[in-house]
Image (cartoon, coloured by chain):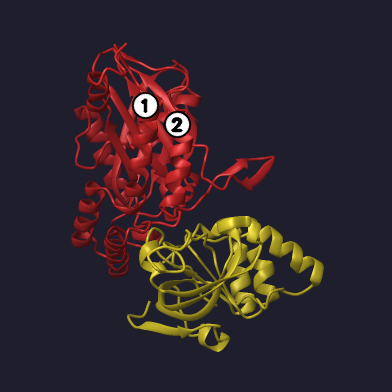
Chain colours: A red, B yellow
Amino acid sequence: MYFIDPKLLGDVVYQAIPTLACVLPDDVLTSLTQALQTETSSRGKLVLSQLLENAEIAAQDRVPLCQDTGTVWVSLEIGSDIAVTGEVFSQVNDAVAQAYEEAHLRKSVVRDALFDRTNTTNNTPAFCDIHPHDEPGVARCHIMLKGGGSDNASRVVMLTPGAGKQAIVDEVLACVRAKGPNACPPLIVGIGVGATFDKVAGLAKQALMRPLNEEAPDEQTAAFEAELKEAINALGVGPAGLGGNTTAFDVRVKTAPCHIAALPLAINMGCSAMRRVTVDLMPLIRAEADLGGAHV
Amino acid sequence: MSDTVHRLQLPLDKEVLKTLRAGDACLLTGPMYTLRDAGHIRLLAELKEQGSLPYGLSGQTIFYAGPTPPSANRPFGAIGPTTASRMDFAAPALYEAGIVATLGKGRRSEEVKRACVETGSVYFASVGGAAALLAKCIDTAELISYDELGTEALRKITVVDFPVFVGIDCQGNDVYDV
């Protein structure tokens, strides 16, 4: 049995944040470069070239890709041989506060959504969750800096089973048409289908973690993703919503069981600066255990 | 949409605004003001109380933006447009009071379009997510008011060749419908 030291998790988050804020992930950069070749609109091409130049400047000068450096999402996946205590996330907020200050990132969190909208001034709290697995040897930390504009363009809809797949397609297209321009296209559209009202949004967010160069887990999902991507890009929303055939880099679908009465759908928009990383914690945990600290 | 890029001097001349069409590419040079969500609630309250725009905002351009702190020897490490529709509640009143242009991203309401037509004003859209690039176009920044709002404070900035597109022109044409 291995144990995750809260300090290790804090260190991982602290290390990840500045790079996420300033360096566009390789898979997104590749898609952006390819889009410039395939985009048909001259305005769309101009937008894409601005985004490419932006990525270059941000990486070179170590400045944020986007002024909205987001809220921090930390999601832990742990296998059957990993033990955590309730305080596993206790160092994460300190890590966020320190990283946001040192890297000159924007603090975008208010104390309470309804009753006290004063800024917490250090971008905490982070939003954290944990997912257990039955198999051993899994310890992954997913980190995402999520912008407000793309989250605001997202939605949850409780469809009826009889409405079926077409209703999902219709909802996704309606959402991209109405809200896509606000979410900073080219988008990565994360789609969750199934589970319950509270869980379906989580599925859509988790879906955004699968890199653009990684295949869907099965053929049905791959085919549905391809169908949705084609339909979305036929809308003409285009880069920055200013017209063109590159509205989405790709679509990511994650499905789950659900109630016989239900067809829950969540659409979580990912912007063109899709800042996320998955860190494999196993090597770090094993190294710590070898030092005699964390093996219980 | 014309292929030429309009080079525009801020504060904007309303006669020049008449020549712009939705979708046109422009480069802005001169002073403008950053303000977003919480700041609009404050500004609207002051406008109602005083009957006119405070802080010398009459004739000026409002950029819907909340920048990051200074970095790389620039006034802001990154600055870019936020979703303009969240400021739709305030925009018609501000256009009527003398704001001549707003700058953000995304679609606006019918009320905003109507206000642009009635007051001869425009809405500019710039590229969301190009904030490191746009930060290189900022020459100076000065805090004007609402300091306690942090990134949402009212700031006067001067920009050089800041790239935008005409989002809504004086005739009510909308780039997002083109």
Q: Is residue B83 left or right of residue A115?
A: left
The chain that hosts pointer 1 is A
**Marker disc for residue A91:** 2
**Element class at badge 1:** strand
**Element class at badge 2:** loop
Residue closer to the observer: A124 or A240 = A124
The amino acid beneath tag 1 is Leu
Query: x, y percentage for residue B107?
Result: 50, 60
Q: Is residue B90 left or right of residue A196?
A: right
Q: Residue at x 29, y 56 (%)?
A: A246
Residue A189, can we see it? no
Which residue was labeled with disc 1? A76
Q: Residue at x 62, y 41 (%)?
A: A111
Residue A108, can we see it? yes
Query: x, y percentage for residue A32?
Result: 24, 55
Q: Residue at x 47, y 46 (%)?
A: A153
User: Which residue of the protein is positioned furthest toward the bottom in this rendering?
Assistant: B15
The amino acid beneath tag 2 is Gln
Quarter of the picture containing the N terminus of chain A is: top left
Disc 1 or 2, which lies upstream in sequence?
1
Tell me if mark 1 has few (under 14), some (14-19) or many (20+) residues whose alpha carbon lies within 10 angstroms of its own: many
Query: x, y percentage for residue B117?
Result: 60, 75
The chain that hosts pointer 2 is A
